Image (spheres, rainbow, N blue to C red):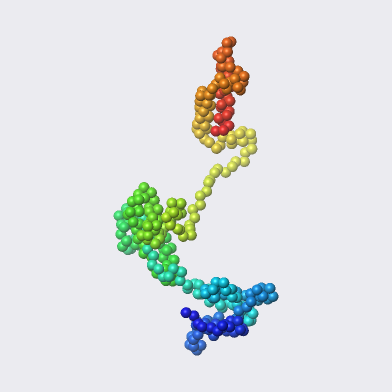
C-alpha cells in the first residue's frame, strides 16, 4: 500500500502533489491536523540540466528506488518558490519512529558480580553481598541491577516499543564449568554463541577469543593504558650522562648480564678448536718448546678477551 497517482505525477507542473495524493494529507481540513509539508508545491526536475544551468536546490527521491533501483528521480521545492524544510522535518519524524528490530523481546545473560556496575538486589534495593550473590546467582526471581542494567533499560525505553522488553538471566552452569578456571564473562559470551540467550550485558573486554564466539556492540567505555616514567632530570654533567647508560637495568640485573656474557665467552673458548683459532688469528701455537706455559697464558687471554667482546657486542 500506497496511493495511485497519474503517470505525470510530479512532472507536469509545480503543484501540491502531496495534498492531492499522499494518504497522510488526506482528511477533513476542518477536523484533522494536516502536516505543513502537504501544502508545499514541488516538481520533479532534470538533475543533469539543473546541476549545470540552475542554482536551485535539488534532491534525490528514494521512493521509486524501492521498485527499480536504476531509476534516479530528483525533485525540487525552490524551483516552485517553496521550501523543503517541512518535508525534511517529516522525513526526520518518520526516521525517528521507524522500527529497526520489529518490537522483539530479548533474553540477556548477566555475569555474576557484586559491585555498582552489575549486581543482584533484594526487594528493598539492597545489593547482595558477595556471599549472598554466590548463593542466589541462579535464582532469577531476585532481579539483576547495576549501571549496565540501567543503561540497557534506558535503551529499551528510548526504542519506544521497538525493543519490547529484556529478560535478564544467569549464565548457564555448563559454560561456567567450561571456564571454571577462566573468566565468567567469557562463559557468558559462550551462552550467546550457543544460542541460549540473545545477548550478554556487562563490562566485557573485547578479546580475540570472545570475538571468535560472537560480535560486540560499539564500545561505550575505553580503558586507557599509559606508561609512567620518572621526569627526566636537567643535569648535563659528564658523571650524570655516564650513569644514564646504566639506567635501563638495576645493578642486580647488570650483574646477571655480565655473568652470562662471561660464562658464554669462557664456554665458547673451551669448546672451540683453540689450537686452530690461535694459529689463524694470531699466528701463534699453544704448544711451543720454549716457555710453553707463558705462551699458552697469553694465547688463552687473547682468546677469552675476543670472546668477551664478541658476546658482549651481540648480547
Please indicate whether residue 257 sits to the left or right of residue 175 in the image: right
Q: Position of residue 111 (x, y in %)?
A: 37, 56
Quarter of the figure with residue 234: top right
Q: Is residue 153 visible?
A: yes
Q: Is residue 164 above or below residue 5?
A: above
> Seen from this angle, which residue lies furthest right?
53
The image shows residue 170 at horizontal and vertical percentages of: 34, 58
Q: Residue at x 51, y 30 (%)?
A: 260
Nearer-the-camera pick, 157 or 278 = 278
Q: Position of residue 279 (x, y in %)?
A: 59, 20
Q: Is residue 9 above or below residue 133?
A: below
Residue drawn at the location 69% of the way across and 75% of the way down: 53
Residue 157 seen anywhere in this rendered image of the structure: no
Number of marks drawn: 0
- Relative to 198, does residue 42 appear above or below in the rendering? below
| Residue at the far bottom in the pictured view | 30
**Residue 125 versus residue 83 in the image, above or below:** above
Q: Quadrant of the C terminus?
A: top right
Q: Residue furthest top?
A: 290
Which residue is depicted at the point 50% across and 27% down? Answer: 263
Which residue appears at 57% of the width and 74% of the height? 71
Residue 25 location (% of width, % of height): 51, 83
Q: Nearer the viewer, residue 133 or 70?
A: 70
The foreground one among 105 and 249 is 105
Tell which of 136 and 166 is nearer to you.
166
Amino acid at each position: 500500500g500506497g496511493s495511485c497517482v497519474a503517470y505525470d505525477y510530479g512532472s507536469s507542473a509545480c503543484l501540491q502533489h502531496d495534498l492531492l495524493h499522499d494518504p497522510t494529507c488526506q482528511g477533513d481540513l476542518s477536523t484533522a491536523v494536516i502536516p505543513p509539508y502537504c501544502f508545499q508545491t514541488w516538481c520533479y526536475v532534470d538533475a543533469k540540466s539543473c546541476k549545470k544551468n540552475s542554482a536551485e536546490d535539488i534532491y534525490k527521491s528514494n521512493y521509486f528506488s524501492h521498485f527499480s533501483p536504476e531509476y534516479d528521480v530528483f525533485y525540487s521545492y525552490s524551483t516552485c518558490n517553496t521550501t523543503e524544510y517541512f518535508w525534511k522535518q517529516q522525513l526526520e519524524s518518520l526516521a525517528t519512529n521507524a522500527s529497526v528490530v520489529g518490537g522483539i523481546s530479548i533474553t540477556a545473560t548477566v555475569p555474576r558480580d557484586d559491585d555498582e556496575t552489575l549486581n543482584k538486589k533484594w526487594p528493598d534495593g539492597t545489593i547482595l553481598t558477595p556471599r549472598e550473590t554466590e548463593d542466589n546467582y541462579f535464582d532469577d526471581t531476585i532481579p539483576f541491577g547495576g549501571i549496565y542494567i540501567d543503561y540497557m533499560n534506558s535503551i529499551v525505553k528510548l526504542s519506544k516499543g521497538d525493543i519490547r522488553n529484556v529478560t535478564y538471566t544467569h549464565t548457564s552452569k555448563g559454560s561456567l564449568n567450561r571456564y571454571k578456571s577462566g573468566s565468567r564473562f567469557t562463559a557468558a559470551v559462550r551462552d550467546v554463541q550457543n544460542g541460549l540467550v540473545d545477548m550478554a550485558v556487562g563490562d566485557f573486554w573485547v578479546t580475540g577469543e570472545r570475538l571468535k564466539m560472537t560480535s560486540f556492540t560499539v564500545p561505550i567505555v575505553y580503558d586507557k593504558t599509559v606508561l609512567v616514567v620518572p621526569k627526566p632530570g636537567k643535569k648535563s654533567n659528564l658523571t650524570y650522562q655516564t650513569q644514564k647508560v646504566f639506567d635501563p637495568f638495576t645493578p642486580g640485573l647488570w650483574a646477571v648480564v655480565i655473568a652470562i656474557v662471561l660464562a658464554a665467552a669462557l664456554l665458547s673458548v673451551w669448546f672451540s678448536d683453540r689450537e686452530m683459532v690461535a694459529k689463524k688469528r694470531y699466528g701463534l701455537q699453544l704448544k711451543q718448546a720454549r716457555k710453553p706455559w707463558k705462551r699458552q697464558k697469553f694465547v688463552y687471554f687473547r682468546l677469552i678477551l675476543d670472546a668477551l667482546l664478541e658476546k658482549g657486542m651481540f648480547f
